[in-house]
């Protein structure tokens, strides 16, 4: 009985320590971000944002588990587009089940998670993935569609840089910077794109 009580006490100490640990910021190498508004001021459902990060030989790790039920799981996605007319938006991505009974967050691969909401039941975020392969490749992807909900992040016209952050509930925040050191492309108020940035970082 003493051994059992000791084990339970040790487990409680570990849980308490883990719960009290402060979340950290981890930075991932950006690949590209595209912010589109094909019909500015006319059709907000045509707005589309896609962003990705891909880091080879990454030292970063995934901390947290968005597949946990209720308030213990889920994550928060933030997108920022800077420039003449900067905009930003925060998307809450809770865990739960779709009308088809499938969970929005699932584990994928050896180490990774995927959020999928193709029908927009929880908002405009269609897809988010965060993965780390056994070969130390770390990747993050996000797709946001105006067809599934209100998207207020627009091409800054002219745009200079952008950020993606993904904060896992009870875990770390992952930052992807798409800086002016990358290839920046502006198409007036219709499109803004950054590819192949070199520097990493979190929003100031």
Image (cartoon, rainbow, N blue to C red):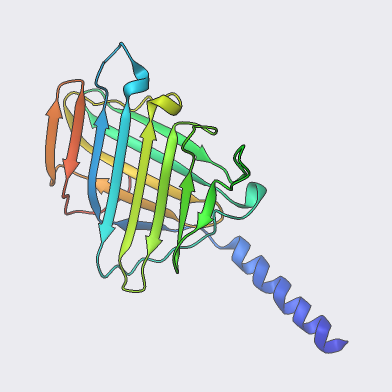
Q: Quadrant of the C terminus?
A: top left
> In the rendered view, does 90 fall on the left or right side of 52?
right
* Residue ranking furthest to the right: 1
User: Foreground: 25 or 163?
Assistant: 163
* Residue ranking furthest to the front: 100
Please name the residue shown 19% across and 44% down the image.
Answer: 179
Please name the residue shown 25% across and 41% down the image.
Answer: 33
Quarter location, residue 59 = bottom left
Quarter location, residue 45 = top left
Is there any visible trace of residue 204 in the rendered image? no
Q: In this picture, is 15 found above or below 125?
A: below
Q: In this picture, is 21 found above or below 74?
A: below
Please name the residue shown 44% across and 31% down the image.
Answer: 124
Residue 14 at what x, y percent from top left?
65, 73
Please name the residue shown 81% across and 88% down the image.
Answer: 3
Residue 110 at what x, y percent from top left?
45, 69
Task: Report how many numbered discs are placed on residues in the image.
Answer: 0
> In the rendered view, does 4 fall on the left or right side of 51?
right
Q: Quadrant of the N terminus?
A: bottom right
């Amino acid at each position: 009985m003493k051994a059992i009580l000791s084990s339970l006490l040790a487990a409680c100490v570990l849980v308490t320590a883990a719960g009290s640990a402060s979340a950290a910021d981890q930075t991932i190498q950006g690949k590209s971000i595209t912010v589109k508004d094909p019909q500015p001021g006319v059709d907000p459902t045509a707005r589309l944002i896609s962003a990705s990060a891909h880091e080879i030989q990454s030292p970063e790790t995934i901390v947290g588990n968005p597949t946990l039920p209720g308030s213990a799981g889920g994550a928060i996605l933030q997108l920022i587009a800077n420039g003449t007319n900067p905009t930003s938006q925060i998307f809450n991505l809770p865990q739960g089940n779709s009308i088809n009974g499938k969970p929005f967050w699932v584990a994928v691969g050896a180490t990774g998670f995927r959020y999928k909401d193709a029908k927009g039941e929880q908002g405009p975020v269609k897809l988010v993935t965060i993965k780390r392969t056994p070969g130390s490749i770390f990747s993050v992807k996000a797709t946001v569609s105006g067809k599934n909900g209100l998207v207020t992040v627009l091409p800054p016209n002219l745009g200079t840089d952008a950020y993606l952050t993904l904060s896992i509930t009870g875990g770390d925040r992952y930052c992807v910077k798409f800086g002016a050191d990358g290839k920046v492309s502006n198409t007036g108020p219709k499109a803004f794109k950054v590819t192949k940035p070199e520097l990493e970082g979190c929003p100031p």
